Image (cartoon, coloured by chain):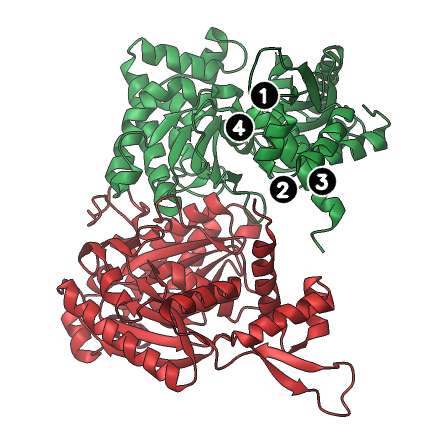
Chain colours: A red, B green
Amino acid sequence: MPNTQQAMRRRNLSLVLHAVAAHGPLSRASVAARVGLTRAAVSTLVDELIRDGLLVELGPSRPGTVGRPGSALQLNERGPAGIGAEIGVDHLAVCAVDLGGRVRARTEVASANRDRTVGPALARLAELVRQVAAEAVREGLRPAGLAVAVPGLVARDSSLVVRAPNLGWEGVDVGPALRAALPGLPLTVDNEANLGALAELWRGGHDPAPRDFVHVSAEIGIGAAVVLDGRLLRGTHGFAGELGHVPVRPEGPACACGGRGCLEQYAGEEAVLRASGLSPEQAAAQHPGPGGRIALLAERAADGDRRVRRALDGAGEALGIALAGAVNLLDPRTVVLGGALTPLAPWLLPALERELALRVADPARSGQGAVTVSRLGSDGPLLGAAHSVVQAVLDDPAGLREAAAVTGSGA
Amino acid sequence: MPNTQQAMRRRNLSLVLHAVAAHGPLSRASVAARVGLTRAAVSTLVDELIRDGLLVELGPSRPGTVGRPGSALQLNERGPAGIGAEIGVDHLAVCAVDLGGRVRARTEVASANRDRTVGPALARLAELVRQVAAEAVREGLRPAGLAVAVPGLVARDSSLVVRAPNLGWEGVDVGPALRAALPGLPLTVDNEANLGALAELWRGGHDPAPRDFVHVSAEIGIGAAVVLDGRLLRGTHGFAGELGHVPVRPEGPACACGGRGCLEQYAGEEAVLRASGLSPEQAAAQHPGPGGRIALLAERAADGDRRVRRALDGAGEALGIALAGAVNLLDPRTVVLGGALTPLAPWLLPALERELALRVADPARSGQGAVTVSRLGSDGPLLGAAHSVVQAVLDDPAGLREAAAVTGSGA
C-alpha cells in the first residue's frame, strides 16, 4: 500500500522543501504553482516546515515591489546541519554545512592513518566531529546526521569498511566509535569517490550539472563513481566504481588486489612517484602535511621536470585506456576528473583525452568536452559527505522529527 | 501534474494486468489484495481489460473447491501479440509471442546481409514480418507492435542504425521500410545484446531472475547489455554496452573501430576462426546456413582439436580480462554468457572464470556462480524483441486502445 495518505504527506513536505531549496526565496503561491498542489495544501505543509525549523518566512515583501505578493520563504540558515567527515590516508577532516549547502564550520588535521591501529584514528575523528558539531550549534544549527568518506570498499547500507588497502584496514566497523560522537543521529559511511561524485552532482558549479558521468577520484588509490540519470550506481554489494583495478595491461605489474596490470599500478600516487624517481620521504620533507605527494608532483611538473612529466603522461595514458573501457560500457555524458588528481590535470589530460579519442569510436563520446575537471578538487568527498546528510533531510523532512523524538533534541 | 486521475487509472490498469501476468489465474478478490485497491475499483478495471481483450474470465471455480470464490482471471491467449524481428549478419528471423510470452508463430531464413544493399534486406524482412503477423492473426491474435534486433549501435528512441560494422551498415534508418509492414503499429529498433538481456530478465528460466547483470552476447561482433535493478542501462546516446571495444591489450591489433587491442580482436568470431586456422569459407561449406562458424568451432572443439581449443581458451581469457573491468566498475550480481557464444561456453568458461577470479578481488564477485550461461542461447535477441512489445502492452494497456483507434483495428 505505497500510497497511504501519510506517505503522500511526507512526500509533499519534501516536494515543497525541494522547491524552495532549488528556487527560493518563493512565496507560498509560487510554491503551489511549482509543485502542483493547492494553495491551501501548501500553506499547511509550509506551516509544518516552519514549525520544524526547516523554512523561514522573510516577512512581507517590501512595499512598492510588484509581482511577489505575500512573504517569501527560504531555507532556514539556522536549521539542520549536515556533518561530513573524511578519513584520508594522511589526514582527517570534518565540516558542517547548512540546508543551503554553505560550509559553516570546518577542521582538518594531518594524521598518518596508514597501518595505524584503527582505534586511535577513529577516536581522534570522533573528537573532531564533536568539535565541529559544537561549533555548528554555536552558529545556531542543529546537527542532523553524520556521513563519513572512506578510501575503500564499504558494504552497502552499513558502516563496515570491507577493505581499504591504502589504509591497511580490512573488515573494520567504524560505526560504534563514530556513533558515540553524535548519539542518536543517523550515521552513514561511504566510499570517498561516491561522495565526491554526489558533491559534483549537487554543487559542482556546472550549469546544468551533468546527470550521467563517471567521476574519477584519487586518494593514493584510484576510485571512481558512476552516476546514471542523477543517481549513484552502488552495485550489488556496494562495490561499484573500482576503476583502480580495471586491467590496463593484463600482463603488467602485480597489484595488491591479487590482479596484474591494474590502473592503480600506472596512475596511483605511488606508481607515479616511483616513475618520477621521487620517494614518499622526499615528498614528506618538502611538502609536509596532507596532499604533500601531489603537491610535490605538481610543483616539479610545473617546473618542467621531464621525468615527472613523462610519468604523468604515462598515468594519463593508463587512465585513458581504463576510462575508454568504462565509456564504451556506460556511454556517460562526460568524465569528471576530481579528488586529489585535479592539481595534476594539466599534465594528465593530454594523454587521457588522446586515448579516449582513439578508443571510443563515436565522436559524440570523445574529443572536446569528453573530460571535465572538478571545481571542488580534493574537497569533493568531504563536502559530498556533509551534503548527503542535508539531502536526506530535504528528501524526507518528516524523518528528521522522528530522529529528534528519539534523541529528545526537538526544534 | 503527474498525478491526474487519468494517469492514475492508466497506472492501475497496468498494475492489475501485471498482477494477473505474474500470478494468474487470480480471482478479482485476489487481484485486489495484491495491488492494494478496493474490490470495486479492481472490478471496474478488470471489466475494461476484458472488454479490450487483454484478460479472459475462466468461469466460476469448480464446485467443491474452497478459498477461491468467483471466476478466475487470466491473460487472453487470443489477445495482443508482440512481433519480434532480428537482422543477423547471415540470417533474418521473425516471431510472434502472445501476452503470456509463448511463441505462436516463427520463421527464419538464411540471408547474407553483410555489405548487401540495405533495401533488399529490409524488403525481405518486411515480407517475413507480414507473413508472421498474418499467421498470428490466424491464431486469433492481434499484432500490437514490432521490435527489431540489430547487431549494431542504434540511436536512443529512434529507428536509426548509427553503425553496424559487421553488416557494413552506417546511418541506416530502418523505420520507413519496416513501418510499412505493420502500418500504424509502434516500431522500436534496438541493439541485439540489449534485447537478449531483456529476454533473460523476463523469461530466462532463472529462479529468481537476476536483476543486476552484464549480458554478453555475440553475433560476429561482441556486444553486451548492462541490466541494473531490473532496468536496461541505455547510456546517454543509447550506446552503452560496447564491450567488444573495451581495450584488452592496449598495444594489440588494430580494430575496425579505430582503436587497438579491443576485445573483438581476441574473442570475435573472425578472430577465433583465424586463430583456429579455419576460414569462413570452410565454415560455410561444412555448416551452411546461419550459425555455421560457431557450429564448426563447437564441432572441432568437441572433437578435441587442440588448435581450436587453444583459440577458444585465448578468447575466454580476453573475455575474462574485459569482464573483470566491467565487474570492478559495476559490481553486478552475475555475468550471463548468451547469444551465439553459448554453444562455445564449455571451452570459453574455464579461462574466463580464471581471469575473473584473478582480477576481481572480492570473493563475493568471482568464483563459483560468477558466470552463468543463458538458457535461451542464440534465440535471446529475437525473443527479447517480441517480449519487449508485450511488455509495453502490460506497462500501458490503455496505450493499445489508442493505437487501435488510430489504425481502426479495435478489439
> For numbered disc 1, what is the local secondary structure?
loop
> Alpha-carbon neighbours of circle 3 within 10 Å: few (<14), some, or many (≥20)?
some
Place of residue B332 in the rendered image (x, y in percent of width and height, measured from the top left): 39, 40
Separation of disc 1 and disc 4 at Cα?
28 Å
Separation of disc 1 and disc 2 at Cα?
48 Å
Q: Choose mark 1 or mark 2, whichever is in front.
A: 1
Q: Which residue is mark 1?
A: B68
Asked if marks 1 and 4 touch (Cβ < 8 Å), the reply is no
Q: Choose mark 3 or mark 1, whichever is in front.
A: 1
Do the dots labelled 3 and 2 sit on one chain?
yes
Q: Choose mark 3 or mark 2, whichever is in front.
A: 3
> For numbered disc 3, what is the local secondary structure?
helix
The C terminus of chain B, quarter of image: top right
Separation of disc 3 and disc 1 at Cα?
27 Å
Place of residue A116 in the rendered image (x, y in percent of width and height, measured from the top left): 13, 65
The disc labelled 1 sits on which kind of residue?
Answer: Arg
Q: Which residue is mark 2?
A: B155
Q: Earlier in the sequence, mark 2 or mark 4?
A: 2
> For numbered disc 2, what is the local secondary structure?
loop
Q: Earlier in the sequence, mark 3 or mark 1?
A: 3
Do the dots labelled 1 and 2 sit on one chain?
yes
The disc labelled 4 sits on which kind of residue?
Answer: Trp
Q: Observer-nearest residue: A159 or A213?
A: A159
> Alpha-carbon neighbours of circle 2 within 10 Å: few (<14), some, or many (≥20)?
many
> For numbered disc 4, what is the local secondary structure?
helix
Could you say which disc has been placed on residue B10 in the image?
3
> Alpha-carbon neighbours of circle 4 within 10 Å: few (<14), some, or many (≥20)?
some
Q: Observer-nearest residue: A269 or B59?
A: B59
Asked if marks 4 and 3 touch (Cβ < 8 Å), the reply is no
Tell me the chain of label 3: B
Q: Choose mark 1 or mark 4, whichever is in front.
A: 1
